Image (cartoon, helix red, strand yellow):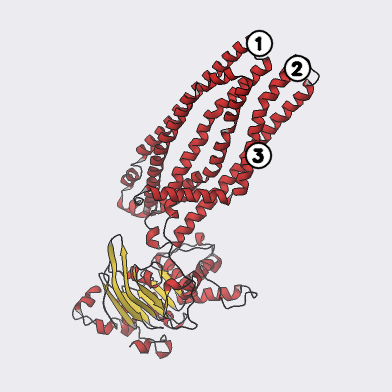
């Protein structure tokens, strides 16, 4: 379900206006060219009535200069048509560039914020904000320019009308206050209606994506009709707001369409009287009528004004992404060849008023494997996210080899810390690309040497072997070159590829957030052995639920309601009935179940630091 936007529309409006101004600067050259062409077209439109009127007078007098002025008429009309076409082409380009810029801005902020901030919005809502809403908002810079320039012909026509004949100009001017009131009411009423329409549209998009994501569950529960009704529950409201918007627009257009001909008839009537009095010639009357038509074109600004209103409302929706707080990063580096010692000092995490971690103090020696256990909701995933700086803590500090994580550059942090998740998302055109995704070159390597495809593929295969994925990948139609879309993967296979990706770029700290939950027991043990002997040595922080995983760890961190209740080896903690209850074990349970079937690796396979912990 979509979470409502934070209270207060003023910050979103300011952020939207700043973004639109920045988008205008991004396409300043094209926007200036479009404005220049539009102004030139307006100039040609203003020159046309005067030239036509003068040419008509010359032709009526059979003046030889009439032929030359007829050519001038053709040239002005052709210039107006060509300039209008150039304006349309340039404004289309500006719309596309502005839309792309707004999408990059929104997506960049979305990807640079902490996951819990991004999770406030459903995937469907985010998609709508970055597609339809951004497209509508991207039209604003060009619409503002064209709407401003669109005022030039009406205003210029009114001035020219005064120059041709004052009385016809005054007759036209008498109806303009009513037109101004119509446009003002349109801007006010349509803005509110468009905003409500877009709000309902976002909610519908969020519900639709939720239903699509849970299609199997809906089918299994037999609730397809109920879910369809839930998704479409606000469709009547969307239709009502859409019809209201078009009624407002249609009513304004109808009124201005009725008003403009009346003004033109008044001008024509007054001009006819002036012609009969001899105060105005035939060419002058033609020019006066054409200038009155240009002045009446102020009603055409309604359409451009509507685009600006819709675009600003859409920009305010998209601006919710622009104001997402970025996860702060520094420019620091980790010490060379550090062991990966992880320290949490007074870490406190609060989300939506709920304290998820309470003043956690923890030290994991470099090279050790620490398993985080606890009941559901105890804060295990939050601890893993803070330890790898996927999110920031509200109080306290997290240090890796003595360096606070918030002082590291983003590149240094991601080279030093790897992650694997319970439900990994795979990216890339092939299986090999998915495993290698996110890898960064060694900053100390020779930049002129370039990438080594054979070495990279071997690293991918080694990581897949360590994750127990190599065998099933080789059975795919194209092996490691198989497209992800053509690779039917089970939950366990997907998780193994996620592990392989983490192993491929393992740094001095590797965070596994319930990353083996979908693996069978045998595969999980093979992965644990590979972690100890085949994957790059370093510190492991593992969120797990299996008692066997905890039994093999160097250190167990027992979380209870966001607090570290105890740390120690599994055998030490097993004496506590509360610890045994975490695994659903009774008082007389074996402290190391099933270990006889999978003996502990020998000293050569143990990661550095194991003996120091024990």
Q: Is residue 286 visible?
A: yes
Question: Which of the two labelled residues, at mark 3 and mark 1, occupies the earlier sequence position?
Answer: 3
In the structure shown, which secondary structural element does the residue marked by tag 1 occupy? loop
Q: Residue at x 38, y 49 (%)?
A: 206
Q: Is residue 133 above or below residue 63?
A: below
In the structure shown, which secondary structural element does the residue marked by tag 2 occupy? helix
Residue density around tag 1, few if under 14, some if 14–19, many if 20 or more, within 10 Å: few
Q: CA distance from mark 2 to mark 3?
A: 33 Å
Q: Give the number of the mark in front: 2 or 3.
A: 2
Callouts 3 and 1 close, C-beta under 8 Å: no
Q: Give the number of the mark in front: 3 or 1.
A: 1
Instruction: Give the residue at mark 2.
Output: 59
Q: Which mark is residue 463?
A: none
**With 22 as the anchor, is 350 left or right in this view?**
left
Residue density around tag 3, few if under 14, some if 14–19, many if 20 or more, within 10 Å: some
Specify the quadrant of the image occupied by residue 112.
bottom left
Q: Which mark is residue 86?
A: 3
Q: CA distance from mark 1 to mark 2?
A: 19 Å
Question: Which of the two labelled residues, at mark 1 and mark 2, occupies the earlier sequence position?
Answer: 2
Q: Residue 371: where, in percent of width, then height?
A: 33, 77
Q: Is residue 359 above or below residue 155?
A: below
**With 208 as the anchor, is 475 left or right in this view?**
right
Residue density around tag 2, few if under 14, some if 14–19, many if 20 or more, within 10 Å: some
In the structure shown, which secondary structural element does the residue marked by tag 3 occupy? helix
Q: Which mark is residue 278?
A: 1
């Amino acid at each position: 379900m979509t979470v409502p936007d934070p209270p207060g529309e003023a910050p979103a409006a300011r952020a939207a206006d700043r973004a639109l101004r920045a988008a205008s600067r991004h396409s300043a050259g094209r926007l200036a060219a479009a404005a220049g062409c539009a102004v030139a077209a307006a100039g040609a439109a203003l020159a046309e009535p005067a030239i036509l009127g003068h040419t008509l007078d010359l032709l009526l007098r059979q003046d030889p200069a009439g032929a030359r002025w007829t050519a001038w008429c053709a040239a002005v009309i052709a210039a107006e048509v060509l300039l209008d076409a150039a304006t349309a082409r340039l404004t289309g380009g500006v719309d596309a560039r502005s839309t792309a810029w707004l999408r990059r801005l929104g997506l960049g902020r979305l990807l640079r914020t902490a996951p819990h901030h991004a999770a406030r919005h459903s995937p469907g809502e985010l998609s709508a904000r970055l597609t339809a809403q951004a497209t509508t908002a991207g039209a604003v810079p060009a619409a503002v320019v064209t709407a401003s320039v669109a005022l030039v012909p009406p205003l210029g026509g009114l001035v020219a009308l005064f120059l041709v004949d004052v009385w016809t100009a005054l007759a036209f001017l008498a109806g303009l206050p009513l037109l101004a009131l119509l446009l003002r009411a349109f801007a006010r009423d349509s803005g509110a209606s468009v905003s409500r329409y877009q709000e309902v549209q976002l909610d519908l998009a969020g519900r639709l994506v939720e239903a699509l994501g849970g299609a199997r569950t809906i089918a299994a529960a037999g609730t397809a009709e109920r879910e369809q009704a839930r998704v479409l529950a606000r469709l009547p409201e969307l239709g009502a707001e859409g019809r209201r918007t078009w009624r407002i627009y249609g009513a304004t257009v109808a009124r201005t369409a009725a008003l403009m001909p009346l003004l033109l008839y008044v001008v024509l009537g007054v001009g006819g009287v002036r012609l009969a009095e001899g105060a105005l010639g035939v060419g002058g009357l033609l020019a006066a009528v054409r200038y009155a038509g240009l002045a009446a074109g102020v009603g055409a600004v309604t359409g451009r004004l509507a685009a600006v209103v819709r675009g600003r409302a859409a920009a305010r929706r998209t601006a919710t992404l622009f104001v997402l707080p970025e996860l702060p990063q520094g420019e620091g580096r980790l010490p060379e060849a550090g062991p990966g010692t992880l320290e949490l000092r007074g870490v406190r995490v609060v989300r939506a008023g709920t304290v998820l971690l309470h003043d956690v103090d923890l030290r994991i020696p470099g090279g050790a494997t620490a398993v985080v256990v606890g009941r559901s909701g105890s804060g295990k995933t939050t601890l893993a996210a803070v330890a790898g700086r996927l999110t920031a803590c509200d109080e306290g500090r997290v240090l890796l080899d003595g360096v606070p994580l918030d002082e590291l550059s983003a590149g240094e942090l991601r080279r030093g810390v790897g992650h694997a998740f319970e439900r990994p998302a795979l990216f890339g055109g092939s299986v090999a690309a998915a495993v290698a995704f996110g890898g960064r070159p060694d900053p100390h390597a020779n930049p002129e040497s370039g990438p080594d495809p054979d070495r990279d593929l071997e690293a991918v295969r080694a990581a897949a072997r360590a994750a127990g994925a190599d065998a099933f990948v080789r059975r795919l139609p194209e092996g490691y070159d198989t497209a992800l879309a053509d690779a039917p993967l089970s939950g366990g296979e997907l998780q193994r590829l996620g592990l392989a990706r983490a192993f491929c770029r393992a740094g001095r700290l590797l965070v596994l957030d319930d990353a083996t939950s979908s693996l069978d027991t045998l595969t999980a043990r093979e992965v644990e052995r590979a972690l100890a002997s085949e994957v790059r040595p370093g510190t492991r922080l593992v969120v797990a639920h299996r008692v066997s995983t905890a039994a093999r760890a160097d250190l167990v961190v027992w979380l209870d309601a966001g607090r570290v209740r105890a740390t120690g080896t599994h055998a030490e903690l097993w004496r506590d009935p509360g610890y045994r209850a975490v695994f659903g074990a009774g008082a007389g349970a074996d402290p190391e179940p099933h270990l006889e079937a999978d003996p502990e690796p020998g000293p050569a396979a143990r990661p550095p630091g194991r003996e120091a912990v024990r």
